[in-house]
């Protein structure tokens, strides 16, 4: 599910290998442009004052604060379910054009909802209600497509791809629906992952066998293992080499510090998964407001995701499968509501990242040490950047993030960097 591939916007494939026959990837069904769920979500995102193709996640977060009933009928007309998928109403969401002079919503859509919101303008109740109706309809369409995929293929394993697969709330609802054994979302399901997909497809076409070595491979970018810092790496910063970075970090987090973490290769995809992260204790009072206001510089309603030891995840979220790439929002448990409200969004879910020692030994050890101090092996994990900027992939970018934000410290390849 994407805004647009070549001509298709949604496809259903079946990957299977039976007996001695070659592995095959078979196209079962497709939805062609102009029916596009990604286009529709982007159009309303732009109408609400955020950048389409980039800030749909902000609209998804805002949706939890709104009432979908207000615009339920409108979104049901704008995105209509069909037997084979869905279609868009061009009187509300006009046909795709290349020129930016033409809006992606019609005057009829505006008259039925609200005027387009300017970026930076106050967020009003009507905006939250429209976001809620859009998100509700998106979830209905994705559930409809998932059920169709299960019927067409007979498979209980579903892989979601394309930019729309980044909608973690809808992915979570699919996992909760009980129709599938497992839902998988790769670490880079959108456009940034197409290079990996192209290489995998070329290998399959050439050999007739699926490529190996892709599973659990999300740390694919540049690394700086031999980084050496001066005691004053930048004016106003002090650095020291740590003998025991795991316990030092866990203790500082438990004391309420917000710390940037730069270690190993850069993650592939849009999620920071422990190599270019900002970590904080979900037990710290006011931590969400502090992160949004002084570190990330973003909207106050934006939630933060937890990273949890995989073998303890069931204590905190209602999810029957792993979520290693922070791609699935799951309902939280009573324990989480009571003890860790900072990681609970307004809709009662958390976009969880589960971690094992095999996947990320350092982060798992930090969670274990933090759990020994606080009784909860759970941390807030967000990306090492501020709103509108790329993740801090290089040491200079990470140091700049420390200097320009309310971060208390940065742990970078074993070096502990603080502000003088």
Image: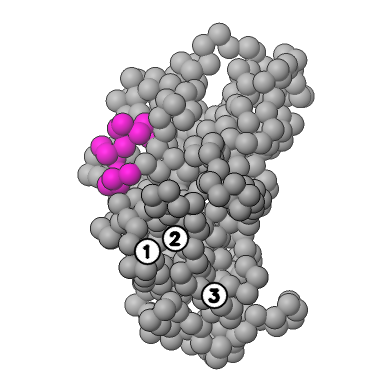
User: SS class of the residue under badge 1?
Assistant: helix
Quadrant of the drawing holding the C terminus? top right
- Determine if residue 327 is in view: yes
Residue highlighted by disc 1: 153
- Determine if residue 183 is in view: no
User: SS class of the residue under badge 2?
Assistant: strand
Find out whether residue 145 is within the magenta segment: no
- Image coordinates of residue 146 in percent, x first then y, are 38, 65
Who's the residue at 44% across and 60% down the image? 14
Who's the residue at 28% across and 45% down the image? 320
Residue highlighted by disc 2: 14
Coloration mode:
one colour
Residue 418, compared with residue 17, is above or below; it is above
Label total for image: 3
Q: Residues within 10 Å of mark 3 (few under 14, many from 20)?
A: many
Q: Nearer the viewer, mark 3 or mark 1?
A: 1
Who's the residue at 34% across and 77% down the image? 69
- Image coordinates of residue 417 in percent, x first then y, are 64, 21
Residue 172: image quadrant is bottom left
Alpha carbon of mark 2 to alpha carbon of mark 1: how far?
6 Å
The first of marks 2 and 1 along the sequence is 2
Alpha carbon of mark 3 to alpha carbon of mark 1: how far?
22 Å
Residue highlighted by disc 3: 36
Q: Residues within 10 Å of mark 2 (few under 14, many from 20)?
A: many
Alpha carbon of mark 2 to alpha carbon of mark 3: how far?
21 Å
* Image: magenta residue range: 308-321
User: SS class of the residue under badge 3?
Assistant: loop
Q: As drawn, which residue projects farthest toward the left?
A: 334
The first of marks 3 and 1 along the sequence is 3
Residue 126, compared with residue 223, is above or below; it is below
> Contact, CB < 8 Å: mark 2 with mark 1?
yes
């Amino acid at each position: 599910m994407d805004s647009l591939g070549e001509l298709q916007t949604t496809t259903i494939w079946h990957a299977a290998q039976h007996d001695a026959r070659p592995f095959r990837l078979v196209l079962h069904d497709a939805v062609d442009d102009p029916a596009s769920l990604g286009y529709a979500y982007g159009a309303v995102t732009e109408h609400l004052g955020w950048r389409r193709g980039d800030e749909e996640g902000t609209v998804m977060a805002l949706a939890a604060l709104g009432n979908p009933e207000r615009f339920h009928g409108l979104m049901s007309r704008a995105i209509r379910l069909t037997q084979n998928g869905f279609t868009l109403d061009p009187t509300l969401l006009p046909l795709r054009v290349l020129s930016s002079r033409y809006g992606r919503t019609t005057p009829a859509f505006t008259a039925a909802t609200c005027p387009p919101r300017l970026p930076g303008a106050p967020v009003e109740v009507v905006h939250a209600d429209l976001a809620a109706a859009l998100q509700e309809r998106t979830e209905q369409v994705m559930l409809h497509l998932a059920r169709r995929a299960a019927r067409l293929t007979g498979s209980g394993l579903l892989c979601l791809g394309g930019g729309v697969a980044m909608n973690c709330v809808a992915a979570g609802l699919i996992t909760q629906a009980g129709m599938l054994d497992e839902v998988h979302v790769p670490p880079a399901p959108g456009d940034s992952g197409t290079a990996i997909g192209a290489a995998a497809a070329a290998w399959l076409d050439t050999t007739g066998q699926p490529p190996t070595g892709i599973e659990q491979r999300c740390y694919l970018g540049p690394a700086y293992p031999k980084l050496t810092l001066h005691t004053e790496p930048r004016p106003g910063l002090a650095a020291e080499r740590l003998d025991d970075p795991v316990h030092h970090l866990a203790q500082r987090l438990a004391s309420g510090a917000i710390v940037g973490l730069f270690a190993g290769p850069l993650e592939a995809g849009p999620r920071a998964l422990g190599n270019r992260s900002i970590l904080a204790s979900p037990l710290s009072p006011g931590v969400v407001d502090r992160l949004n206001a002084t570190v990330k510089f973003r909207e106050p309603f934006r939630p933060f995701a937890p990273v949890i030891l995989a073998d303890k995840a069931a204590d905190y979220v209602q999810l029957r499968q792993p979520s290693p790439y922070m791609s699935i929002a799951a309902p939280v448990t009573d324990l989480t509501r009571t003890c860790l409200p900072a990681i609970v969004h307004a809709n009662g879910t958390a976009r969880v990242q589960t971690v094992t020692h095999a996947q990320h030994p350092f982060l798992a050890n930090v969670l274990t040490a933090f759990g020994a101090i606080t009784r909860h092996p759970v941390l807030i994990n967000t990306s090492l950047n501020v709103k509108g900027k790329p993740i801090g992939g290089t040491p200079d970018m990470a140091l700049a993030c420390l200097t320009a934000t309310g971060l208390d410290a940065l742990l970078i390849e074993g070096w502990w960097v603080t502000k003088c």
